[in-house]
Amino acid sequence: MTIGTVDTEPSPLELTRRPFGLTFTMPLYVGSSLNPINSSIIATALVPIATELGVAVGATAVLVSSLYLASAIAQPTAGKLAEVLGARRVFLVGIVLVLLGGIVGSLGRNLATLTVARVLIGLGTSAAFPCAMVMIRRRAEQAGLDEPPGAVLGGLAIAGMVTAAVGPPIGGLLVGTAGWRWAFLINIPVTVIALAMALRLPKDPPLDRADGGFRRIAHRIDLIGIIGFATSMTSLVVFLTGLPHPDWAALVVLVVAAVATSWWELRRRTEAFFDLRGLTSNGALARTYVRQALTLLGVYSMMYGLTQWMEAAYGLSTVQTGLMLLPMGAVSALLSRPLARRNLVRGPVIASALSMLLGSVGIILLGSDSPVFALVLVSLIFGVTMATTTVGNQTALYMAAPADQIGTASGLFRTFGYLGTITSSVIGGIVFRDGADDHGLHSLGVVLVAAGLAVLLLVVLDRGLMRRRGAAV
C-alpha cells in the first residue's frame, strides 16, 4: 500500500444506508467553524488587550493579520499534506494546534506571545476545510455518487457562515463579562469536543515505509514549492497592508519569489504544489477562485466598513453594531442549505453578483440620517450575497477540481478568499483615511459596485459555467 489520500474503506452496508451520517459529518462541521469564529471573535478583544498590555490599539492589528496570513499560506499546504499523508491525520494535527494556540494565548503576557498563539490557531484551523473536502470527495466516490453531496457541502458552508456571524456577539459577551483571555480560552473546550468526535472518523491507511521517508514526502508535497508560495504570499500581504504607502521592498520580494516559484512549478511534471499548467487549462477552477476573491472583498468590505461607519458616524454602540450584522448571518444560514442540496452553481453565483451590486448601491444611498431599517436591509442583502457565493462557488470548486487534487484546490480556494478579505481591509483604510464619515462610506460603495460588476461579467461571459442539480444526500 502506498501513501494514501483517503480514509480506510467503510463497510458496504454503511455506504449504502447512510454514507454521510452525523458521525462522519459533525467533526467536519465543528472543525470548519474554528477558523471563522477565531477570525471574528478577536475583534472585540483588541481594545482590552491593548489596555492591559500597555500598547497602542493599532499595534494589536497584528493579531488579526497574523491569523489571516498564516491561514492564507496554510490552507493549500494542509490540502496538499492531506492528499499525501492522509486527511484524518492532518485534520487531527490541526485540531491539536488550535488547542495549543488557545493555551498559549490564554497564558500570554505580551503581544509577541499572543501573536504566536494566533499563528498557531491560524495554522491549525486551516487544516479543517481542505481535509474535509478530501474526506467528503472520497466518501462520495466510495458511495458511488455521481453528483456532489450538496447537503454535506451546505453544512460546511453553514458552519463557516454562522460562526462568522455570531463571533462578534459571542466575543463581546465573553470579553465583556470574563475578560479578553476568553478570546483564546474558548478554543480549549471547542477543540476537546472536536478532537473527541474526529477520533471516530475512518482511519487513513498506514504509510508505506518505502515512500514514507522525509525526502520522498518532501518531494511529493513539493516542499520547495510550498516555501516559494509562502514567501510570495507573505510579501504580497505586506505590500497590500502597507497601501496607500507601498512597501517597494516587499514588492521586489514578491516579484522575485513569484517568478522563481513559477519557474520551479513549471519544471515539475507531476505533484506540483501550485499546478500552474493545470490551473491554466482548467479555466472553470481559475474563474471560481477569482469570483470568490472579488465577492468576499465585497462582503468583508461591507462588514468592516459599515461597522466602522455605524459606530463613528451613525452613533451606534459596539453591541448595537454587532446586532445589526446578525440578519446577514441569519439569512446566509437559512439560504445555504436548500441551495446546496440542489447542487446549483450558475443561479447562485449570478444571485451573488446581483445582490452584491444591489447592496453596494444601498451603501451609496445610506447616510447618517437614514432609518435603522435601511441599515438592516443592506445587511440582509449582503446575507444573500454571502450565502449564494459560498454555496455556488464551493459547489463549482467540487465539480471543477481534479479528484486527486481536491485538497490543494480547496486550500487555494480559501487562500483567494483571504486575499479578498485582506484587500477589503486595505480599501477600508483608504476610503476612511479622513474618518468613517458619509463620504467615505459612499466611496466604499462605488468601489463595491465596480467589484460587483466584475463578478457579474465573470459569470455572464462564462459559457462553461453550468447549472447542475443533484440528489440530496
Image (cartoon, rainbow, N blue to C red):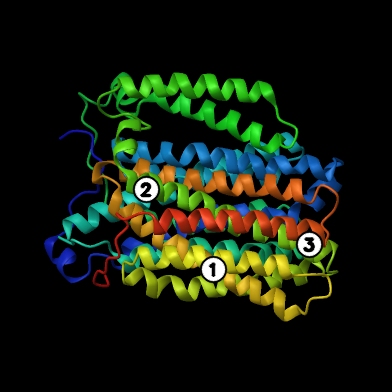
Residue position marked by numbered label 3 in the rendering = 309
What amino acid does circle 2 point to? Cys
Q: Quadrant of residue 197?
A: bottom left
Out of 322 and 289, give the one closest to the viewer.
Answer: 289
Q: What type is the residue that disc 1 sits on?
A: Ser
Q: Badge 2, how many Cα within 10 Å: few under 14, some, many 20+? A: many
Q: Amino acid at mark 3?
A: Trp
Kindly tell me whether residue 162 is visible in this rendering.
Answer: no
Q: SS for tag 2?
A: helix
> x, y (%) of residue 171?
69, 61
**Relative height, residue 70 to residue 382 (above, below):** above
Please state if 111 lies on the left or on the right of 141 as rendered: right
173 or 251: nearer the viewer: 251
Query: Horizontal and vertical percent for residue 92?
Result: 41, 46
Tag 3–tag 1 contact (CB < 8 Å):
no
Q: Which residue is mark 1?
A: 355
Residue at the spot 78% in from the left edge and 56% down from the top edge: 440
Residue holding disc 2: 131
Label 1 residue SS: helix
Query: Mark 3 or 2 closer to N-term?
Result: 2
Q: Which of 63/199 is in front? A: 63
**Mark 3, mark 1: which one is toward the viewer?**
1
Circles 3 and 2, Cβ within 8 Å, touching? The answer is no
Residue 177 screen position, x and y as percent: 77, 65
Which one is in front in this view, the residue at disc 2 or the one at disc 1? 1
Gap between marks 3 and 2 measured at Cα = 38 Å
**Residue 224 placement: quadrant:** top left
Label drawn at residue 294? none
User: On the rendered structure, is 305 left or right of 138?
Assistant: right
Q: Residue at x 74, y 37 (%)?
A: 244
Earlier in the chain: of badge 3 and badge 1, it is 3
Distance between mark 2 and mark 1 Cα atoms:
31 Å
